[in-house]
Image: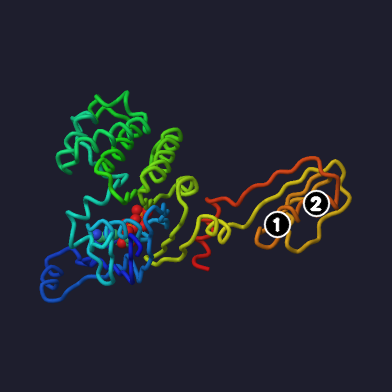
Amino acid sequence: MSLIQVADVNKEFRINRRQKGVASSLRALFKRDYSIKHAVKDLSFEIDEGEVVGYIGSNGAGKSTTIKMLSGILVPTSGSVVVDDLVPYKNRKVNARKIGVVFGQRTQLYWNLPMEETFDLYKKIYKIDAAEFKRNVDFFVELLEMQPFLRTPVRQLSLGQRMRAELVVSLLHDPKILYLDEPTIGLDILVKQKIRKFIRQLNQEKNTTVILTTHDMDDIDQICHRVITIEKGEKIFDGSLDLFKHTYSVGHQLTVNFKVKYNDITDPRLKVLDSQENRITVLFKKEEISVTECLAMMSEIGEIEDIKIKEPDMEEAVENLYTVGSI
Ligand SMILES: Nc1ncnc2c1ncn2[C@@H]1O[C@H](COP(=O)(O)OP(=O)(O)OP(=O)(O)O)[C@@H](O)[C@H]1O
């Protein structure tokens, strides 16, 4: 049975429409005046232990609402959410032991305490066994290169240092599942890379299941094996990272420089983007024609000097997803 099971879940929010003024306040006493926001609609998916899943969608698509239902903060309006055999909102305490959560915008740190003391505090809160605690702190501090700032009060840490600290705090009790909501937002590229590497290692060494929401497509590209996309509350794609790219990207781009070029290409599976005296750029889908076949064709139309292949691009795939929708 899957570790996370989401079946036919809906989440509605009631939004008050009350206008300003005494008359409208009086009216509101007798007549309910609100609209319903369907944040998540008929959502179903399953996630197995050890999977690393990117959960993506544009602003307001319903990502955070889903994560909040998975972590037990929100109650679904209908449908069922089961995480490791528990219904999260009914078992918030037990569920909290099994999950780690990092919301990019919300902190779990104490402003005036250095990290070392914050870790000790969480050790007490979660009643973490001393040996397990030491093992984890050593492991995480080394992987995230946190030694130099362990004794610095949190308020003096940079955003990147704080985000690394957030990750450690959420993982000290060895949770089975880690929910990450925009973990690299606002960070410089070096810290982003450190965090991405850390998440990959965490998954490999501890088999932690990771669900990651982000607007940074490099996060997805470099960390996730699977992608689920949601738009206007509805799931529109669920599959491997490769399938995602191939479904939504326009294809591979091949540029060939020729010593001598005799002809132009005519095969309908290759779309010519640019053709010059000694160079041609074509677009193709790997499912329709292989790279080898493509190159064989190129060698028939000229003497090849040099080639360059551009893989389908994640950013471009997401752009297409948002404009095309589900296919
Ligand atoms: N407490 C709430 N009350 C009313 N509406 C809400 C509430 N929380 C979320 N919503 C609405 O539900 C929809 C989904 O919001 P959600 O925060 O899940 O989106 P998101 O995909 O995480 O977006 P973002 O990428 O901007 O963080 C949005 O239209 C949002 O305005």
Residue at (78% x, 50% y) in the render: 275
Residue at (78% x, 62% y) in the render: 267
Please tell me how crowded label 2 is: few (under 14), some (14-19), or many (20+) other residues with Cα within 10 Å.
many
Name the foreground residue: 180 vs 271.
Answer: 180
Q: Any mark on residue 33, and which? A: none
Q: Is mark 2 within 8 Å of ligand 1?
A: no
Amino acid found under the numbered disc labelled 1:
Ser
Please tell me how crowded label 1 is: few (under 14), some (14-19), or many (20+) other residues with Cα within 10 Å.
few
Q: As displayed, is residue 247 above or below residue 123?
A: below
Label 2: element kind: helix
Label 1: element kind: loop
Residue identifier under label 1: 290
Residue 142: x %, y % from top left:
35, 30
Residue at (22% x, 50% y) in the render: 97
Residue identifier under label 2: 298
Residue at (74% x, 55% y) in the render: 272
User: If the picture is divided into quarters, which one holds ligand 1?
Assistant: bottom left
Residue 294: x %, y % from top left:
75, 54
Amino acid found under the numbered disc labelled 2:
Met
Q: Is residue 265 left or right of residue 160?
A: right
Q: Is residue 91 left or right of residue 162?
A: left
Residue 303: x %, y % from top left:
85, 45
